[in-house]
Amino acid sequence: MSIAPRPAVHRRWLEPARIGAMSPLGGIVAYGLLGLWAAFVLFPLYWVVVTSLKLPVDVNTGPYFLPWVDFVPNLHAWRGLLVDDAGPTFRAYLNSIIIAFSSTVLCVLIGSMAAYALARIEYRPRLVSILIFVLALVGACVAVGVAGIDWRVATAVALALFVLLARALGRRFPGAVHNGDILFWIISQRILPPVVTIIPIYMMFQSVRLLDTHLALILAYTVVNLPIVVWLMYDFFTKIPIDLEESAQLDGASRFLIFFDIVLPLARPGLAATTLLVLILAWNEYVLALFLSTSRAQTMPILVAAMNAGEKGILWWTMSVVIIIMILPVILMALILQRFIARGVLLGAVKG
Amino acid sequence: MAVPQPAARPSRVEVTASLASAAPLARGEWLDRHARWLFIAPAVVMILIFSIFPLVASLLIAFSRVRLRAGTYSMTFVGFGNFEKQLVGSEQVHFLGQLTAFSPPAWVVVIAVAALLLWWLVGYARTQLTVIGLLGRLVTAAMLMALTLMLAATLLSGGQIGTLGVTLFYVFVGCAVQFLIGLGLALLCSQITRGRAFFRVVFFLPLMITPIGIGYIFRMMADTGKGPFATLWQWAGLGGFSWSADPWAARLIIVVADSWQWIPFIFVVLLAALESVPRDLVEAGEVDGASSWQIFREITWPEIAPVAATVMLIRVIEAFKLVDLPNIMTAGGPGTATESLTLHAFFAWRSLDLGQAAAVSYLLLFVTVVLCVSFFNLVVLRRRAAMAR
Amino acid sequence: MPSGRATSLTINRLNKYFGGNHVVKDLSLTVAPGEFLVLLGPSGCGKTTGLRMIAGLEAADSGEILLGDSDVTHVLPKYRDVAMVFQSYALYPHKTVAENIGFPLKVRGIDRATMERAVREAAAQVHMVDYLDRYPRQLSGGQRQRVALARAIIRRPAVFLMDEPLSNLDAKLRGYMRAELKHMQHALGVTTVYVTHDQVEAMTLAHRVAIMDHGVLQQIGTPREVYESPANLFVAGFMGAPPMNFVRGRIEQGRFVGPGVALPVAGEAGPRDAVLGFRPEDARVVAAGAGLFDATVFAAELTGDVTLVTLTLGEDTVAIKMPKEYEADFDSRVAVDFAPARGFLFDAASGARLPAHLVRAGAA
């Protein structure tokens, strides 16, 4: 059988010059489009940097693009925010750092432990126990909300009822859920729009006087990011050869030692990437902070958002400075860790 | 059975032996014995307290009228009152939009969608019928039909869309645009040999930036008076045009800003997926004389489809939660033209109408869960199963 | 818990199911103190599962495991006083050689100085003292193997368990490490259970070999016993390279009758389908008509030290080792000869060895 060779028309443009290369036309199109997109990505960032160096008059009298050519760069906006008006900025910055870092550490620790447990230990909670738990929870909520019973009493009664009933009925109905179901349950928490849960959380923190504190935001951020950590780390842990853990087990190591001394160090790339991702999410989070912080625990996104409200309109130069100081640390870390994220982590987890 | 007697052991190892086995293993014994529960308990307890309990409480609030007083609150049960208000009552225009009589194109679309859904259900019922499968598909179909009817009665018949319609616009139009561009860029980037690392880093930048910042950046970009493209606008005779005053222009610029942030995410993941497609498969296709399109259609796409489906699921889930961009860029305006459901709930909460806020958020949750679970079961799982075969 | 002293290991009617799969069936065996026992069988025969149950990595569904006199069936692995060398070596990639070897002592909270001394001693035993600061990825396969061994011997466990420890090495290194393993086990005198699918390893290393198939223990005995007196067709066919030759036929009226074969049989064997087996090295190829039965030459291959002659006999083929000078034409007629005492008779249906043997023609 013979297949006719392709006609030689346009070969110079459409066929690669040598094996393994692109055709010249394809190369031009590919680099052209990618370059166009790179410009689309980079230009707004460039504009922010340039704007931060402008005086109000430079902004208001029309677009100027090139410092030293179009206009004289000036650190007026930087000085205004970091020196003259340093108090609120630094407080918000510090709040953001405390909250984002604490919640990230907590979240990655708790999430990795759960992910590891789900990857290596078999759980079989009974379906009927879960059902009883939900019923007890609903009962407690109704009792507190509608009947006005003290929440401590309601919680204690509900817990006692749950333990009693679960013990009594657990053996009768053997249906149980597996690790995969628990994993799915934890991951699926991410579907919940935060606005659904935030109102009761607000009331909860209000009743224990934790509103507008670091702790409230740390806990809230930890929970919303937990599904991501469990999801990503589970994938990493299942890829670690189980031989290593069994060997350590025979050598006499406890589960905790195995986890902290063998498993976590081996999952370091995944841990790094997950930490970065969670850190970015916590650092940039807006809605929860909007509900839970008013002044003392105000984070950077809230500070930035509040600049909208000025009477003079938005001070673009100041805004640009704030945006820059907010993204600098993240970009710095992302550049260091981008290889991890780009390749292994997301893909591995996404493949499912 | 005669077993050869072991020779005398070298004495130097004996020291080690006695020491090793004599040492106690008791440290942290209690911890180790309960490790099984200690490992998973923190995560589960956190989720129960801050996710499951609020979910239940929120449902309760959605069925109540809540009055906040200094430090405390009182709840009155009002049944479906809050939901009625949103769906058929005074808030209907806000939530669903301005419902008007169907125009001819609206009829066409409604009938077409109904026919499609019916065809899909019948096709399923004929092949592999299970009770749960049918129920799930019925819920999916009902949700799609309801959303179609809502859009037909508002958008297609000349009425304004409500916050539900706006949210759907952000989710479907936004995600579709992001997927197409993200996939296109990933395909281009996987073809080139030099500079891939550069593009990967550059395209990754927007993901790092706080959405609040992006909101402001794009307000600046879109400013027809002082923005970088002001000269261009003035030349086009649009110098006085304000994006935030026109509903569709405002929605569009929000989708553009959202895409600017999220296309990189899709790009990075799909590029990694493309790079992990086995080279020998593609090479076999090339040797067999397949065209680039055939190679993509027959080899590359089936390989990356599971990843693409999952990445879109993640994107859709997050898109339903969109709130920061509209709040910063337009504050939901003009009117309620760019208000997403989360923003709607937030505004209700800010006016201390907790029952309405909870009802709106539960409606959002309902739509999100039905659509996302449908997408997961009908698309993601199927793609993965196809790959696993 | 006894330790550092050779301990016996007893397994009683051990069973294991994976779902509906009965992977270990009623396994019973005793390992004497200081004995080197090899569990031999094809992959999937249950030998590794058996070993993992001894280690405590899998729970037994029924039966008991005794270390010395103490029942460890339900004891957690870390209290069993057993050490295991994994097929993958299971070295911790982020720890140095010294840290790897010292890990069992570290988890027991041994003080630093003692640990360092012990690590050096253990490393010296496996000739790895010069590599203590390296990481596993910087070592060759054989060196990793030594580190894994050192980590096992450092605590002088009651029992060594080894799961195909040599299978990841190349052929030459495997031969060398085999000899070293044998010497070390002899020197340390630790009770050892060693799992392998390689019958050469089993023959060379073991005091006794236990052969398993489909979860059932087929035969246990010294390598010589197992080789010279196989209990059934499976054992006969598994041991030896090339394996034992089989000729299918029937025993009738005191004769074994096969394709072109008719040999007198003595012993208690009623009429039945039977298999005649003989080892390639026990037989000779002789001129047609001069042997026990005639056959056709299929191929003759010079392997170096011997010439392997393959003959066809009806539908069966048999292989015979001849001196390297031997040559034969394709398709020529020859005869096979061996001492009748070197032939084994098996029941074709059950595979069990028959209490019967061949005799010289005319002697019946």
Image (cartoon, coloured by chain):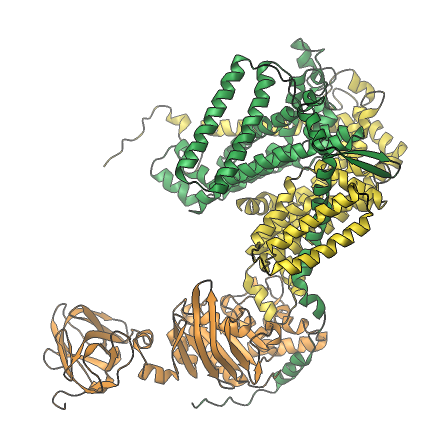
Chain coloured orange: which letter?
C
Determine the residue positioned at 58% across, 37% down: B372
Q: Is residue B42 left or right of residue B120?
A: right
* Quarter location, residue C76: bottom right
- Rendering coords of residue B153 (x, y %): 59, 18
Query: Foreground residue, A173 or C339?
Result: A173
Query: Foreground residue, C209 or A321?
Result: C209
Residue A349 makes an appearance in the image: yes
Furthest residue toward left: C289
Give the vertical position of C125 relative to B219 (above or below). below
Query: Foreground residue, B280 or A222?
Result: A222
Q: Is residue C271 left or right of residue C173?
A: left
Determine the residue positioned at 43% across, 40% down: B129
Chain coloured green: which letter?
B
Give the vertical position of A128 relative to B51 (above or below). below
- Rendering coords of residue B83 (x, y %): 69, 29
* Quarter location, residue A69: top right
Q: Is residue A162 left or right of residue C309?
A: right
Q: Is residue C122 left or right of residue B245?
A: left
Determine the residue positioned at 46% across, 89% down: B4
Residue A16 makes an appearance in the image: no
- Rendering coords of residue B239 (x, y %): 70, 11
* Quarter location, residue C304: bottom left
Query: Foreground residue, B155 or C38?
Result: B155
Of the chain colours in the picture, the one used for chain A is yellow
